[in-house]
Amino acid sequence: MTDIPIDDRGFTLGHGLFETVLWTGGDLAHWDAHVQRLERGCRTLGLPTPDRAGFHTAAMAALADAGTPARAAVRLSWSAGSGGRGLDVPQPPTPRLSAIATAIDAVSGPVSLATARVRRNDRSPTSRLKTLSYLDNVLARAEARAAGADEALMLNTAGEIACAAAANVFWIRHDVVFTPDLDCGVLDGIMRREVIAACHHLGLQVEEVYANPGRLAGAPMFITNSLVGVRAVASLDGQALLTSRWVAALARAVRSGSK
């Protein structure tokens, strides 16, 4: 466990990035994709990229500290490091790496969503990054839980469908799979990419769109992230949704592709 100084910019300003990687008893799933996404985020934030070997070593050390469980979430944080008071980035920045692993169970069954009032800021470059500042997502999830749902559906500042608090969002109409365009303020999710690739493999049309909530209107939905893979949505704002055979088919395709 890394001690974090009180002047660390990740602690004081949320200045930094993180990745959460699924460990499945011998494999860090989609490891290269996670590392590459963090490196892209570093370029956006003007941070040096971590040494890849050291990044992997930190993940494995965290798993060892946790007793190397059969299934775990491994979170790696890359903060901007220590700096003086204020907003200006110290030059050169000296990022700090920390990692923690937590045993988790596999999830099963569909999830319920509630539309949150908290909006995704599609005009901010950080909306497309996994930054250490995730408070909007925390508030959206809390709002959904207070409404009796499992997860939040977040809209952006234009009122368009964006994402869930901790997942990408998809829906299906007439055998076409839709997902919000990245410019809606959407994280470039690892599983989002996997699902799009699986759609092409299965011969399914997939469209990245700008859409208002009316486009959902009872359509089959599913959410994706690196820990749950593909998970069907049972209801949105208390309304039961239709099901689609393609949700299970895509879940199988993504699972087989991760081996």
Image: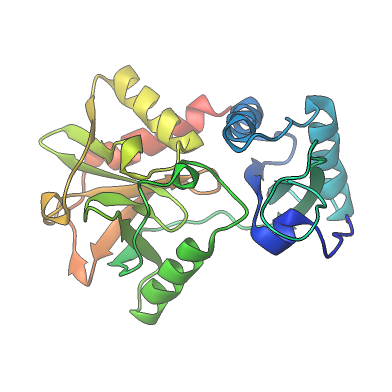
| Residue 230 visible to the viewer | no
Q: By what rule are the colours in the image chosen? A: rainbow
In the displayed structure, 138 sits above or below 192; it is: below
Q: In this orientation, which residue lies closer to the viewer: 173 or 47?
A: 47
Residue 153 x, y percent position in the rendering: 32, 60
Residue 50 x, y percent position in the rendering: 77, 32
Rendered residue at 47%/38% (across/down):
189
Quadrant where the N terminus lies? bottom right
Residue 186 x, y percent position in the rendering: 39, 43
Residue 37 x, y percent position in the rendering: 58, 31
Q: In this orientation, which residue lies closer to the viewer: 13 or 75?
A: 13
Quadrant where the C terminus lies? top right
Rendered residue at 15%/33% (across/down):
175
| Total numbered labels | 0
Q: In this orientation, which residue lies closer to the viewer: 236 or 87?
A: 87
| Residue 156 visible to the viewer | yes
Q: In this orientation, which residue lies closer to the viewer: 245 or 104?
A: 104
In the displayed structure, 183 sits above or below 106; it is: above
> Which of the 4 quarters of the picture holds residue 242?
bottom left
Residue 7 located left or right of residue 187 = right
Residue 110 located left or right of residue 103 = left
Residue 210 located left or right of residue 120 = left
Residue 143 located left or right of residue 35 = left
